[in-house]
Image: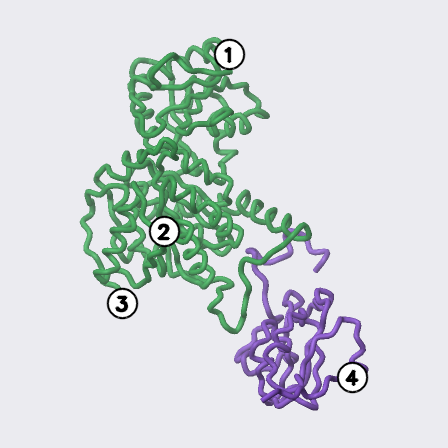
Amino acid sequence: MAEKMELRDIEVWDGNMAASQAMRQVQIDVVAAYPITPSTPIVENYGSFLANGYVDGEFVMVESEHAAMSGCVGASAAGGRVATATSSQGFALMVEVLYQASGMRLPIVLNVVNRALAAPLNVNGDHSDMYLGRDSGWIQFDAYNPQEAYDLNFIAFKVAEDHDVRLPAMVHQDGFMTSHTAQGVHTLDDDTAYNFVGEFQPMNDMLDLDNPVTHGVQTEEDWHFEHKARQHNDLMTKVFPKIEAAFDAFEKLTGRRYNLVETYNVEDADAVVVCMGTSVETAVEVSKELRAEGKKVGVVGIRVFRPWPFEAIRDALKDVKAIGALDRSSPNGTVGALFNELAGTLINGDTKNVLSNYVYGLGGRDLTKAHLREIFGELLANAEAGALTTPTQQFVGLRGPKLSFL
Amino acid sequence: MENNGWNDFEIGAMLRSFEKPVSGVATILQEDRPYSPNNSFTASVADWRIEKPIFNKDYCIDCQFCWIYCPDISIISRDKKMVGVDYDHCKGCGICVEVCPTNPKSLLMFEERADEEAMLAAWPEKETKEK
């Protein structure tokens, strides 16, 4: 039996420690991991908890992230609670197996500490790796601070393992900005945390010897399409109600409220930025300052990136005149992913919003309050004009001549 | 099954071996197990084969080498007595012939359309080895 850990009501934890404490509290059966900056401390802390008797489980050391996720797939198909963590290049190496995990409907939880993708090599936070996972069939939660990294892990296990869902889930946090920034984190005691997620309920597990199953089968043109359609259907229709139910239950337990889409000062706003990660908190602070100056600006933070909360976003933005999509990843040849998603969400709506795209913060470059003031200023001008007053896509915080397109 | 829609199957890239729960399956003969239509035991892959092994029981010593080495569980043996070849699943790899220790061999490869009785009638003689 695992030892219990006494926690203070508020612990000073960075995002990594918050994630590893949540992983300890849900008592994972198998963690197969290959550490990589900046997510290294998640598995390091977890390994230490396990070695010191706080976890009844297995830690599998592997030779790569591809092997880490493969180990997770095997352990999950065998019928255990499974999780791991990674970042950046390691995430990229996992990608092939991410599709296996979701197609096999294995409820693995992956903590992704977001980091830029090389080249040039860079260990700091941007959203390139998160965007790389967006078509992989996983549920993607985004935390903006260590508290949320802690809380969303419980939500992720609860939703992913639900037998109506059975899809893997990622919990994202920004590399260094969240993962290495210590803040006060409200904790749950071990029993309360474990009971919120509950005992793992296996489904079609390989260790059920009286009902042998083959996992990871091959299907060609005769069946592949039906399987993929079923997975997409379940992502589109079954996941949101379960996430919302989990958010409700979590609020009842802790008083902390999460939503598919987080909105700040959006009612009556003329201009809104839509962003993810730590930028949401900076943007909210700037929006408060601008509100005090009488400017009607707000912020939308994407809490659930996949499945994309189409209706919640359309509802949140329906009366907003100008919207700035802030993408922390190089789109490499098109508009940013958030711009694209928002355009697809809003185009058939009743109101015409002016939508523009800002690429910012690559490789951990700071998004300052001054940048956000400038962006809000341009969006308010768009709102006033009822049309774009800037190029569609602009780069923010970049040295050299102003870079913009379209 | 062919007409099942996307909403008609169990989730996951997963197939069940049996149509109902089975306990102690290792002690149940293959022909008595409730294999599901998804299991390859219920499908013939005989047309993958271009050469087939023919079994001649006159020379067999029931050593079970062929049964042990067959990679496709296609040597049928009951109570440690050699019965024959499962031609629905044999791929014609020839390993059983390779490992057969008798002289002449009790299993030999022939082209797929060869007539079994004719081949048995024309089975090679014992080879005399030079001392």
Comes first in the chain, label 3 or label 1:
3
Label 3: few (<14), some (14–19) or many (≥20) C-alpha neighbours in 10 Å: few
Q: Kindly indicate whether the residues beneath marks 1 and 4 are on one polypeptide chain.
A: no
Q: Colour of chain A?
A: green
Q: Residue at x 37, y 55 (%)?
A: A197
Residue A86 place in picture, x, y as percent: 36, 45
The amino acid sitting under disc 3 is: Met
Q: Position of residue B12 (x, y in %)?
A: 55, 56
On residue A202, the disc is none
Q: Amino acid at mark 2?
A: Thr
User: Could you say which disc has been placed on residue A84 in the image?
Assistant: 2
1 or 2: mark nearer the eye? 2
- Residue placed under numbered mark 3 in the picture: A1
CA gap, disc 1 and disc 2: 46 Å
Local secondary structure at mark 2:
strand
Question: What residue would you read off at disc 4?
Answer: B122
Helix, strand or loop at label 3? It is: loop
Residue B58 position (above or below residue A64) = below
Q: Comparing marks 3 and 4, which lies closer to the viewer?
A: 4
How far from the left and from the top, in percent, is residue A78? 45, 63
Asked whether residue A280 appears in the rendered view, the answer is: no
* Residue at image coords 33%, 36%: A174
Asked if residue A399 can be seen in this view, the reply is yes
Residues at marks 2 and 3, common chain? yes
User: Are callouts 1 and 2 both on one chain?
Assistant: yes
> Marks 3/4: CA distance?
70 Å
Disc 3/disc 1 C-alpha distance (Å): 64 Å
Q: Which residue is mark 1?
A: A387
Residue at 26 percent of width and 55 percent of height? A47
> Which badge, 2 or 3, comes first in the chain's sequence?
3
